[in-house]
Image (cartoon, rainbow, N blue to C red):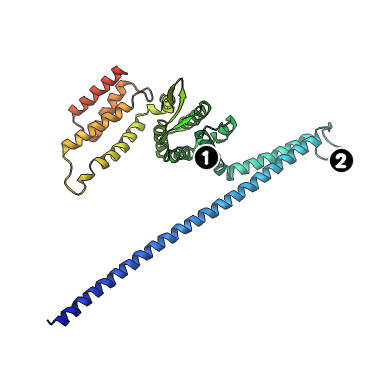
Amino acid sequence: MSKSESYDTVVQALTGEKEQIIEQYERELASIREERDKALKQLEDEREKRKSLSYKFSLLKREESKTKRESLGLLRRTKPVKSMTSSNGSSNPRSLRMSSNRRLQRNRSFLNTTMIPDMSLAALEGITTDILNSIVVTSTRIDNVRGLLKTDAGRRCLAFLLREHFKTVASVKLSNTSFESMLVIYKLSLDEIHISNGADYISAKLLRELSFRIYRQKRNTSEYLKERIKGHFIFMHLGFWEEYFCDDLAKAYSKAFVQYAKQTKASTDEHNVFLARQLEKFVLQMFGWGKIPVATLHHFVSQMADKFDLPDDYVSQIEDAINHEAKSD
């Protein structure tokens, strides 16, 4: 093959490779543009939805205010009348008041069925923000979100609002009043939690974790929210702690054994040592929560050991650690 032929062959090969690269780049660019357009469309839809909700909310508030004004004016006009029925057969004051009350009830009913979830979520966000900034929150405002906290969606909203706040700060020091308000919100949520509900389990876990970061200054010491919720009955459920441990174990395992992903698998002994350390660390953190007896902690360790095939000698070490902690506690 001559030099010119060799050169032409190389040029053709490079040209073909270049075209393939360009085609691949165009496909990837088209995919990126498509994803961008979808994201922009979703953002625009969300904006329109918010505008619509805001407009409906303003109309409903205006209508409610108008109805209340009409009701008050009607009651004032009819109050001096003493007869039950007028001579011309028109409605008496009692029936007028009842009619007015029906309008108010109908208006509130419509409000509850259409907009209360959105209004309550906004109210919950406002209360949470105010408490975290040590702004006094009235009992009336708390009562306004009591119904929302009876739903798993409301409890989940509270947990995620708090989690978002703590993405920017390590901990929050509250005033005495705000600390007590946060405690009320916490207890309202925990009282309604059902561990069998997966969403509720996540809420309970988040609320527990975040309680380590909320505190107040009391008698020259820091009192954390965790100390005030430890005794709640929700933390007596071993099902909650089992899910909690499995979650923590999965996260810790993925971090600890990431080096084995492209190499060889970890040995059985390494797994057992790792599992025993994680279980011991976790069960010692359960002390004081839900007033769980030591015997129940031993039972929990046995359950987890059976679940993950942990040898008895490791179990004995963990049980010794539990007994030692119980004596020192």
Q: Amino acid at mark 2?
A: Asn
Q: Residue furthest left?
A: 1
Nearest to the observer: residue 76 or residue 90? 76
Question: In the rendered image, which residue does mark 2 sit on?
Answer: 88
Nearest to the observer: residue 171 or residue 59? 171
Q: Residue at x 25, y 75 (%)?
A: 15
Give residue 190's position: percent from left, percent from top: 45, 31
Picture layout, residue 36 above or below residue 103: below
Q: Residue at x 44, y 57 (%)?
A: 39
Whether residues under marks 2 and 1 lie with C-beta atoms below 8 angstroms apart, the answer is: no
Q: Secondary structure at mark 1?
A: helix
Res 183 label? none
Closer to viewer: mark 2 or mark 1: 1
Tell me which corner region of the image, top left, top right, bottom left or bottom right, holds residue 267: top left
Question: Label 2, label 1: how many angstroms apart (C-alpha)?
Answer: 54 Å
Residue 150 falls left or right of residue 264: right
Question: In the rendered image, which residue does mark 1 sit on?
Answer: 125
Residue 195 falls left or right of residue 148: left
Neighbour tally class for label 2: few under 14, some 14-19, many 20 plus, Cα within 10 Å: few
Give residue 263's position: percent from left, percent from top: 17, 48
